[in-house]
Image (cartoon, rainbow, N blue to C red):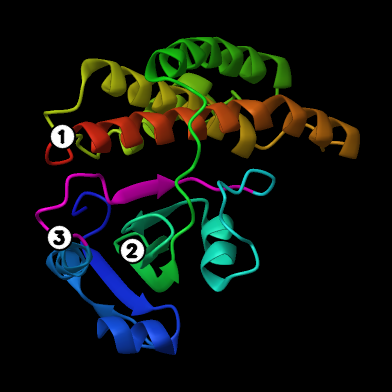
Amino acid sequence: MAEWAPMHLAVAGDQETALETGLPWPSPRDEGVAGLLTLIRAQVPSDRTNPAIELLLPHPGATSNVSPKSMFGRLAIQTGEAVLVGDPETRGLGLVPTVEGPDVLRWTVFSIVLPPRAMRDFTLGEAEYAMREAVRGAAEALGSLQSLPTRTELGDPRTRISAELADLGRHRYPSEMSDRALRVLESADRVAAILSVAQHSSPTEPATALGAAAREDLIRPLWAAVRKARAIALSTSIESRAPGR
């Protein structure tokens, strides 16, 4: 977590959560990594035998069983990521990270009834194959969009993809993580880097509405594949490390 940002702020998402957890509300406080881990451990008994943490990567149109009607759900969908702590369909915590600046990560915490665990219709092996296909698809998408300026070093796609990968590679994975899960995550990072360059590059000519829609149609399923692969790789790793497994 320290790799993500030197400073971690925490704030309750509402007054009820503040009363239950002792977190500040409505202004955040610098809890640091230790404070956040203490909060999570208080929610997860040491003698449990099943995983109590789930990563969600919701997105408009694919909300990962998060209700957009709740404050937690709306913020999670807007941010694109959230963490659930506790047993499904019981009261637990929902944490949503948001970047506050280059060195600050803010965690908004909600005391909620956790949704049922997301149904998994994809194995880790299938995710690995899907990511191999997605790498090719992302490269083809980048080439077909032809929207990258190349007159300067900053405009070179390879330079920008390498920079994206370097940023994504700052985090470290547990040494106990399986080789297959690690390969899936590394492939997902590569696809995400290519897509980020394609998606955020300024076109050499003003894009038409039709062209923008075509670009979105090309990129959207690849981003969905990245989110799905990351969620599966991390959830299987969490499950394999649960006590008693």
SS class of the residue under badge 1? loop
Q: Where in the figure is residue 234, as x and y percent of width and height?
A: 32, 35
Neighbour tally class for label 2: few under 14, some 14-19, many 20 plus, Cα within 10 Å: many
Q: Nearer the viewer, mark 2 or mark 3?
A: 3
Is residue 152 visible in the rendered structure shown here? no
Neighbour tally class for label 1: few under 14, some 14-19, many 20 plus, Cα within 10 Å: few
What residue is shown with label 1? 174
Of labels 2 and 3, earlier in sequence is 3
Identify residue type, mark 3.
Pro
Q: How many circles with numbers are drawn on the protein?
A: 3
Is the C-beta separation of discs 3 and 1 under 8 Å? no
165 or 110: nearer the viewer: 110
Distance from disc 3 to disc 1, alpha carbons, whole Å, reads: 21 Å
SS class of the residue under badge 2? strand
- Quarter of the image holding residue 23? bottom left
SS class of the residue under badge 3? loop
Distance from disc 2 to disc 1, alpha carbons, whole Å, reads: 21 Å
| The disc label shown at residue 105, or none | 2
Which of the image's four quarters has the C terminus?
top left
Is residue 231 visible in the rendered structure shown here? yes
Neighbour tally class for label 3: few under 14, some 14-19, many 20 plus, Cα within 10 Å: few
What residue is shown with label 3? 45
Q: Where in the figure is residue 190, as x and y percent of width and height?
A: 42, 23
Q: Where in the figure is residue 164, as x and y percent of width and height?
A: 41, 33
Identify residue type, mark 1.
Pro
